[in-house]
Image (cartoon, coloured by chain):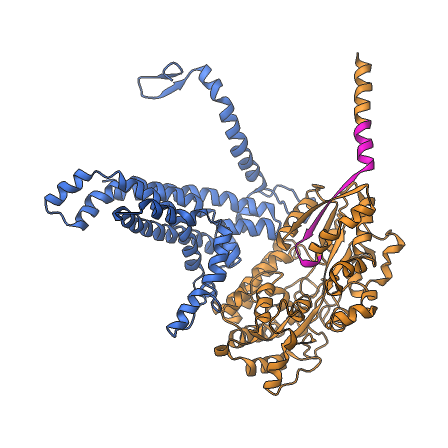
Chain colours: A orange, B blue
Amino acid sequence: MRSAWIILSAVALSACSSKDSDRTTLTVATVNNGDMVRLREISNEFEKSHPTIRLKWVVLEENVLRQRVTTDIAIRGGQYDVVTIGPYEVPVWARQKWLASLDDMDPSYKVDDLLAPVRAAVSYDGHQYAAPFNGEGTITMYRTDLFRKAGLTMPEKPSWSFLLQAAAKLHHPQEGVYGLCLRGKAGWGENMAVILTMAHSYGGRLFDEQWHPQFDKPEWQKTIATYVDGLRKWGPPGAVGNGFNENLAMFAQGKCAIWFDSTVAAPFLSDPKTSKVASDTGFAAAPDEGLGRSANWLWTWALAVPASSHKTAAAKEFIRWAAGPDYAQLVARRYGWLAVPPGTRKSLYDNPAYRRAAPFAAITLKAINAADPASPSVRPVPYVGVQYAAIPEFQGIGTEVGQQFAAAVAGQVSPADALAEAQAATGRQMTAAGYHK
Amino acid sequence: MTAAAISTGSGRTYLTLRARLMIAPAVGLLLAISILPLTATLWFSVIDYRLLTPGSSRFVGLANYGRLFTDAAFLPALLNSIILVVLVLAISILGGLALALLIEGAKVGRGALRLLVISPFFVMPPVSALLWKNLLMQPVAGFFAWIAAIFGMAPLDWFARIPLVSISIIVAWQWLPFACLILLTSLQSFDREQREAAQLDGASAFAIFRHLVLPHLARPIAIVVMMETIFLLSLFAEIFVTTGGGPASSNLAFLVYSEAMLRYDVGAASAAGVVAVLFANLLAFFLVRAVGRSLDV
């Protein structure tokens, strides 16, 4: 009787496992931007060519994605086989051994085709832990028609001082045109991304070598004075409510004369279907005060495999397909060259068809190559990242400090008080986290 | 029930064994869904539990609470919680009472009016917050800015200048129907003969309202205060969507969120959660007592 049970259960078990071995379901967690949504649409091609792999998609807004994926990976929940992360997560998570290394990718992945700064951003200790899917840098976007009318010429590499002078001349609120648009919405990935990048270009740094916050230094006073003054005098009303999306909508409606932000905006602003000012939009390099670092940040959404996943081989095969060099052709055939995820591979920028379709290709490539997350400041720093610092505490610090600077733009506190509070709050958080003994 | 519950002389009621067994599943379920998470939260609040720093689960006593009370964001959050509750209660009860009196006086179409009044209650909080933020209060393209421009005034930058009031208006708009409906139902049960008698005695409309209608509404108002307070203390979506937190608009619930989901500090978040629970109970206790006493005469 007992042996019969054993045989029965063995048969049942083997039936299950044989089913599992010929079909693997990968759960992919990703962000809801246009490139990723297209990846999801096009992924039936992958399932056609890989009949044993099925994909289950979890597509989320950036912050929700980060919260879900971070909690899952930290408690080793193992819900996801492929996760979408960025250079902020890679060093922190790789140090904890939460990610599987991608050094052993199939040669058809062509790892040497990746742009050097992008590849470096998703590597830790010389090992690659994520496969960049799209990449972005920062540029200055401006209205060529307004510049012409005011007799101004945008230099190839403008300085912050020039941008503010130009903004003052182009600021005509009664006609619905505001001189300067910048992210003002509080958040570590919103206003803090711009402010920290700006501070780095003013010669400042977030921490010194002993992890002491530097908000009390003159470079920061200059940065915050310029930022707050610029937005209060030449910015649109309600600037503290504007993140990337709000500014994009305002610029596309013709309400901004100058906007400094991510290269992600360029395709939208160049397309007459999504922008009223498509033919009057110009692109220049990110601002540079000539102090050794320009305001160039780098971000990439990259696919990674959690160390807790048991389906590593299938996950890497999917990543090879999605982030490999052939994916661009696939997207171009179905959606056209403008829809190809930009900013990760040299081959895309060598492609004449892409260069013809995308007028912003050259400036995007330059912006990405100008970014140096490993050495964001002219002074030595203990952290990696231009618009962030890749330590677990940065999200909390960026959120709290970002709220102070937003309050300064809203006029609730003075820039000096905001900086003092930022210094105190950051010091408190770093002490609580055990950086200062 | 008489067989299961035995009344003793002192007025207390004891249950027989059979009755206890019969309610055991319900009590068990209650324990499982309320006491277990609470216990877990209490435990997390006394250990050093940061998600991104593995291996950190040592017992730290009350250190998490100490950090919370010395956090510069704590007192403003506590104050904001109270201000939000009081503002929304004031707007929704006064407005709801006015609306209820108007609808009660309507001769035709009362059913249709009631339907219209209740509709904001069915709009999801994030949706209504987005509607208010982007269509009404937006200082460049919003409806209020347009009205201000017609009168030649500068548009008000709502969320930068008066964040708490702006959020309160949004939330009150959602809770107005609730207050209005409860008060309306109660108004309809008000004794008509009593009113007529008062009128015959020469009482003014205000005197009738003050001395007859308002005491009649004491109970329903207490209920509205109680229910709204419970929900308003955990207000989150409207703050998240409009201002994204900050010292000027974060409440306790938002503080818990930022500790847990932005700093991944489960210990600190649990401590803040425990404090929020204690605070909610205290506030509800005093509010309901105060309202009950002032009206229940």
- Residue that lies at the very extreme toward the bottom in this rendered image: A151
Q: Is residue A89 left or right of residue B130?
A: right
How many numbered marks does the figure carry? Answer: 0
In the image, what residue occupies the spot 18% across and 46% down? B208
Depth check, front residue: B173 or A273: A273
Q: Position of residue A191 (x, y in %)?
A: 59, 65
Region rendered in magenta: A14-35
Q: Position of residue A90 (x, y in %)?
A: 74, 55
Task: Residue A27: say if magenta.
Answer: yes
In the image, what residue occupies the spot 49% across and 18% down? B21
- Residue that lies at the very extreme toward the right in this rendered image: A107
Residue A88 in which image quadrant: bottom right
Depth check, front residue: B47 or A367: A367
Q: Position of residue B3 (x, y in %)?
A: 38, 14
In the image, what residue occupies the spot 68% across and 65% down? A264
Query: Is any atom of residue A214 visible in this view?
Result: no
